[in-house]
């Protein structure tokens, strides 16, 4: 994994542009602690920070092909690069290194923009064609690796991180109000927006070409087409299990390619345990696994992780997070680039920090829930479809008042919160009900935060519009597959994968996600609904496929998120929030006080709302009010 940056300007690069390339490259040293490279010619320049994984001696970047026509700066890994190299060599292409980077260069020379359709991996790159004076940007199928860009006239700037682009003196850091609306509603920013106006994310499975100031965007892979085709027919469940087993083994085996030590995250859930089991069956050496827990035992998954590690015979390492995490938060806000309110960012960072002490590459079980329907929300959607038959008067005057009356428990399970959320949106459309499970602050609460002027500027926009549009892309799919598709396009791409990328890169660790191998994702989407969700059981086929290989206590344990005990933590931050003024959110102090009073009195569980406001405040202070050239020194 690496950090990349580039700039192209058809009027030619200035001294300021050259200085920007060097500064932005250095700014991302955490993404690539093993080396730095900068290449500049008249109209274009690339920067690269390297985390050496493949071809340690010969893979330095930016890299040129043998003809010097093509130059690339690349972040990621191409798992099928050896197969592609053999094919390209048969077509007389010359290779000067053993790296996967050079394979992309020659693949582009042979296939042009269609080269991305032949890549199996996680990638984001910029590639310059010196003959055609064309810049080509591309991002992997699911959006595992980030790529952001800014265009103004004849100038295009791209980078792995937002703060790197903000180093350019021509860019003003103005808040994108629609992105702010996203964040306050769901805790993250939906692509292609970023929190800064005029800086965009390149969407997953998309490439961009830029020539003479003109851009062309194209989606090269479309999971929606798989969903809309409807389910495949299998001769039997056993045949489906056999095919799933083969796909899992293929995906994990492909991602074991490395010239440095690798290990795996192990939570004791079925997703990470599946990945580790496939690793153990493919690697002769003892696999190293890593787990994080909390001193609050109701939040800790360490006993399950130990059970899985003992059963699979791994060399297991674990660490308990104590409550002195506060010094870490400003550092996380800086690393995450945009405001980000997922509390599991803290244990994810700690997990990456632990793993990096022993390995340079770690495999993760991320993506299993979106592929095989692992979240409780899919069950809730199913139950709500039945609940809608309850007569409206019973719902309105009996059930709703009773559930609203329930006191807040502030417990991890928080059944009172889930019941209130369920009943509040039970009479909504299926799309709105599913969206409601992601909601943090309501539209009314957001208006209190930013006032009437910003509300008018938004023109009625809410992030539900994005969710609704994704639902429309899969209008012919089953109800479950529609929700899985929307979650893949939103929650997975813009929150879960962002969380892991930023936390891992902050520690110089590469994280691979075999359950998001795009062919495995296609297979999962094509499964009949009963193979994913049947009755009250989630991940049906995956669980039955892994029964022979894992303890039943692991296979059939209830779903537990990788969350932090936020309700016990937020009350410590009032002073930090109230000591600052926020121009775009003038109502922040008043809402913080109101939510805190309700929370302490247990009239409502406002932990996640307060956390959302806290992380906005820390991001604002770390990115917009501090020197972008330096990461915060407090924390570790």
Image (cartoon, grey):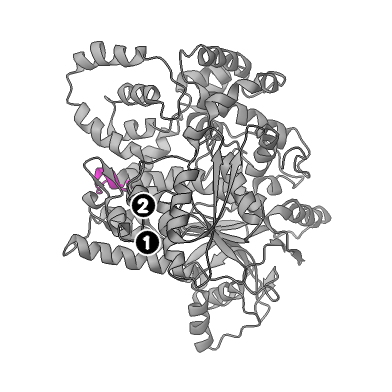
Q: Which quadrant: the C terminus?
A: top right
Identified at 75% across, 42% down, the residue is 628
Q: Height in image: 220 above or below 269?
A: below
Front-lying residue, 572 or 232: 572
Q: Place residue 569 in its image quadrant.
A: top right
Mark 2, other Cα within 10 Å: few <14 / some 14–19 / many ≥20: many
Where's residue 440, x and y in %?
47, 27
Residue named by callout 2: 371
Tag 1, which secondary structure?
Answer: helix
| Residue 614 left/right relative to 279 | right
Verify whether residue 270 appears in magenta.
Answer: no
Give the side of residue 473 with respect to residue 292, left or right: left
The residue nearer to you, when weighing 585 against 284, is 284
Closest to the observer, 244 or 108: 244
| C-beta proximity under 8 Å, tags 2 and 1 | yes
Graded by Cα atoms within 10 Å as few (under 14), some (14 to 19) or many (20 or more), the crowding at tag 1 reads some
The answer to which of marks 2 and 1 sits earlier in the sequence is 2
Extent of the magenta region: 473-481
15 versus 177 height, above or below: below
**Residue holding disc 1:** 520
Quadrant for the N terminus in the image: bottom right
Closest to the observer: 220 or 533? 533
Task: Identify the residue at image location x=49%, y=73%.
Answer: 80
Residue 171 is situated, as x and y percent measured from the top left of the image, at 71, 43
SS at mark 2? helix
């Amino acid at each position: 994994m690496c950090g990349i940056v580039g700039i192209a300007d058809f009027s030619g690069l200035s001294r300021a542009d050259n200085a920007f390339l060097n500064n932005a490259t250095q700014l991302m040293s955490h993404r690539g602690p093993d080396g730095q490279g900068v290449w500049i010619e008249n109209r274009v320049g690339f920067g690269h920070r390297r985390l050496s994984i493949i071809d340690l001696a010969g893979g330095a970047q930016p890299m040129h092909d043998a003809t010097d026509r093509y130059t690339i700066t690349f972040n990621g890994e191409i798992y099928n690069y050896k197969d592609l190299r053999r094919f390209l060599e048969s077509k007389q292409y010359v290779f000067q290194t053993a790296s996967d980077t050079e394979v992309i260069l020659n693949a582009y020379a042979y296939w042009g923009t269609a080269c991305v359709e032949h890549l199996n991996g996680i990638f984001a790159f910029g590639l310059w064609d010196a003959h055609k004076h064309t810049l080509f940007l591309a991002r992997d199928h699911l959006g595992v690796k980030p790529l952001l860009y800014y265009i103004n006239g004849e100038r295009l700037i791209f980078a792995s991180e937002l703060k790197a682009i903000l180093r350019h003196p021509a860019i003003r850091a103005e808040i994108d109000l629609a992105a702010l609306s996203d964040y306050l509603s769901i805790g993250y920013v939906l692509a292609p927006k970023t929190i800064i106006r005029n800086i965009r994310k390149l969407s997953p499975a998309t490439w961009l070409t830029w020539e003479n100031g003109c851009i062309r965007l194209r989606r090269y892979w479309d999971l929606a087409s798989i969903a809309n085709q409807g389910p495949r027919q299998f001769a039997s469940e056993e045949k489906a299990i056999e095919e799933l087993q083969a796909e899992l083994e293929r995906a994990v085996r492909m991602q074991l390619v490395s010239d440095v030590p690798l290990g795996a995250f192990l939570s004791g859930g079925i997703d990470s345990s599946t990945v580790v089991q496939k690793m153990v069956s493919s690697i002769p050496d003892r696999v190293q696994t890593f787990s994080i827990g909390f001193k609050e035992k109701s939040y800790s998954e360490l006993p399950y992780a130990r059970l899985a590690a003992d059963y699979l015979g791994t060399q297991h390492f674990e660490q308990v997070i104590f409550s002195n995490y506060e010094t870490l938060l400003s550092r996380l806000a800086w690393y995450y680039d945009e405001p980000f309110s997922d509390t599991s960012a803290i244990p994810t960072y700690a997990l990456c920090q632990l793993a990096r002490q022993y390995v340079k590459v770690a495999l993760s079980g991320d993506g299993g829930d979106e592929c095989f329907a692992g979240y409780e929300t899919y069950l809730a959607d199913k139950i709500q479809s039945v609940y809608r038959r309850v007569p409206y008067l019973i719902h309105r005057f009996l059930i709703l008042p009773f559930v609203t009356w329930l006191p807040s428990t502030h417990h991890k399970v928080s059944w009172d919160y889930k019941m209130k959320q369920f009943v509040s949106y039970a009479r909504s459309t299926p799309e709105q009900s599913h969206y409601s499970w992601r909601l943090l602050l309501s539209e009314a609460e957001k208006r209190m935060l930013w006032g009437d002027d910003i509300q008018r500027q938004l023109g009625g926009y809410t992030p539900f519009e994005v969710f609704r549009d994704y639902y429309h892309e899969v209008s012919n799919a089953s109800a479950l597959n529609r929700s899985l598709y929307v979650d893949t396009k939103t929650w997975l791409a813009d929150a879960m994968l962002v969380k892991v990328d930023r936390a891992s890169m902050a520690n110089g660790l590469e994280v691979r996600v075999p359950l998001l191998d795009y062919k495995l994702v296609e297979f999962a989407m094509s499964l009949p609904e009963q193979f994913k969700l049947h009755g009250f059981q989630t991940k049906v086929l995956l669980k039955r496929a892994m029964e022979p290989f894992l303890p039943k206590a692991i296979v059939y344990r209830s779903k537990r998120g990788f969350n932090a005990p936020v309700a016990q933590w937020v009350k410590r931050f009032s002073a930090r929030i109230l000591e600052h003024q926020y121009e775009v959110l003038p109502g922040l102090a008043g809402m913080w006080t109101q939510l805190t009073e309700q929370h302490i009195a247990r009239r409502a569980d406002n932990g996640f709302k307060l956390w959302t406001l806290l992380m906005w405040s820390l991001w604002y202070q770390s990115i917009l009010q501090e020197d972008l050239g330096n990461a915060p020194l407090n924390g570790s």
